[in-house]
């Protein structure tokens, strides 16, 4: 394939052959069955992407929540995101917290801004996690549609170790879960009970997406968060809670509204797991936490 591309290149009179380093990965799936790219180290050239992206002068928003004891994760998140998240590009971090006074002061790069937004807490951690969808949807309507071009929702209990750049930008973006990228779909953790609005029938499903990192254009994230929270609300009215909370609703949504780009598990690696050889770069990973202690 490379040889024929190079020959075609020569015939067109384009100077020099294609850079062979452009085609590096043969060990992983690079395109979804609906032709969305799956982003892995070795599948893109960041300089080319940066040059294209700079001409557009986009602003990217990041919504993250630090409620109750999760304020302890703010420093690690913001400190590492300041360095590694869309380095050199305009980013607005929107931090929702019930403890604004506990937000540490961090010297952000000139192109990065931090907005601290007070938010109420809930006694159940599951409600804090699920209500993020509602809060994001409301803020898009009231503010973000005027302020940012793309919006990403990220868990706060994570740290970044390597650059996460403009290769993540697309209309609707989901991250393949590091727990479930090799499992056959029927053993994935989808909600299967038909009573839940998050239910995915057996035999259906493609990838399992982590709710820790998703995003896209503001209008697509609005549709996603509004639909997922509608599902959460209807489940509550019917006395049912989906197996993995809003993550189950996210998976249902992304099954029927296919992402235009998928991020490989490099973009959210769970610290509990041993890193396989296909993960060449751990860009972002969870911070180990004592669930019993931190959630109560
Ligand atoms: C998974 C998902 C998470 C969410 C959750 C729901 C991944 C990697 N993460 O993570 O996105 O869907 O399952 O079951 O798939 N939070 C607070 N205070 C709290 C509790 C939560 O601020 O007391 C916020 C915080 O931003 C946190 C997020 O909610 O990062 C998700 O909670 P989690 O990280 O404890 O959920 P976890 O690890 O089970």
Image (tube, rainbow, N blue to C red):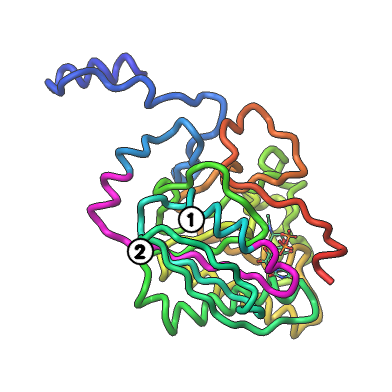
Is 61 included in the stretch rendered in magenta? yes
Residue 230 visible in the shown view: no
Residue in the picture at 55% in, 56% down: 79
| Residue matched to label 1 | 82
Image region (quadrant) for ligand 1: bottom right
Badge 1: residue crowd in 10 Å (few <14, some 14–19, many ≥20) = many
* Near-viewer residue (223 or 195): 223
Q: Secondary structure at mark 2?
A: loop
> Which residues are the magenta region?
50-73
Q: What quarter of the picture does the C terminus occupy?
A: bottom right
On screen, residue 16 versus residue 151, left or right, reads: left
- Disc 2 target residue: 59
Q: Is residue 235 above or below residue 268?
A: below
Q: Residue visible at 52% across and 54% down? A: 81
User: Residue 215 shows which numbered tag?
Assistant: none
Q: Residue 75's image quarter?
A: bottom right
294 left or right of 227 in image: right
Q: Secondary structure at mark 1?
A: helix
Q: Characterize the local packing of mark 2: few (<14), some (14-19) or many (20 or more) Cα atoms within 10 angstroms.
A: some
First of labels 2, 1 by sequence position: 2
Q: Residue furthest right?
A: 292
Q: Residue at 41% of width from left, 70% of height from top?
A: 219
Q: Position of residue 22 (x, y in %)?
A: 37, 26
- Reply above or below: 164 against 100: above
């Amino acid at each position: 394939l490379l040889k024929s591309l190079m020959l075609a290149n020569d015939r067109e009179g384009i100077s020099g052959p294609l850079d062979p380093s452009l085609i590096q990965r043969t060990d992983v799936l690079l395109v979804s069955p609906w032709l969305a790219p799956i982003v892995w180290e070795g599948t893109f050239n960041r300089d080319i992407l940066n040059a294209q992206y700079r001409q557009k002068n986009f602003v990217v928003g990041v919504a993250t929540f630090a409620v109750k004891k999760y304020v302890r994760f703010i420093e690690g998140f913001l400190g590492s995101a300041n360095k590694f998240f869309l380095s050199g590009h305009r980013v607005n971090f929107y931090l929702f917290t019930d403890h604004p006074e506990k937000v540490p002061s961090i010297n952000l790069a000139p192109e990065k801004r931090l907005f601290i937004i007070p938010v109420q807490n809930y006694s159940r951690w599951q409600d804090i996690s699920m209500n993020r969808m509602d809060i994001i949807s409301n803020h898009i309507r009231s503010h973000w549609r005027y302020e940012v071009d793309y919006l990403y929702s990220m868990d706060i209990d994570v740290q970044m170790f390597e650059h996460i750049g403009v290769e993540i930008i697309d209309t609707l973006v989901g991250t393949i879960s590091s727990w479930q990228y090799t499992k056959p779909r029927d053993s994935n953790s989808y909600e299967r009970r038909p009573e839940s609005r998050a239910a995915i029938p057996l035999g259906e499903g493609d990838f399992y997406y982590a709710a820790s990192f998703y995003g896209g254009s503001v209008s697509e994230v609005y549709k996603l968060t509004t639909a997922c929270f509608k599902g959460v609300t209807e489940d509550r009215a019917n006395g049912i809670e989906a197996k993995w909370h809003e993550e189950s609703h996210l998976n249902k949504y992304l099954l029927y509204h296919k992402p235009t780009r998928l991020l490989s598990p490099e973009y959210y690696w769970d610290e509990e797991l041993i890193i396989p050889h296909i993960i060449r770069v751990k860009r972002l990973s969870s911070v180990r936490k004592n669930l019993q202690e931190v959630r109560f």
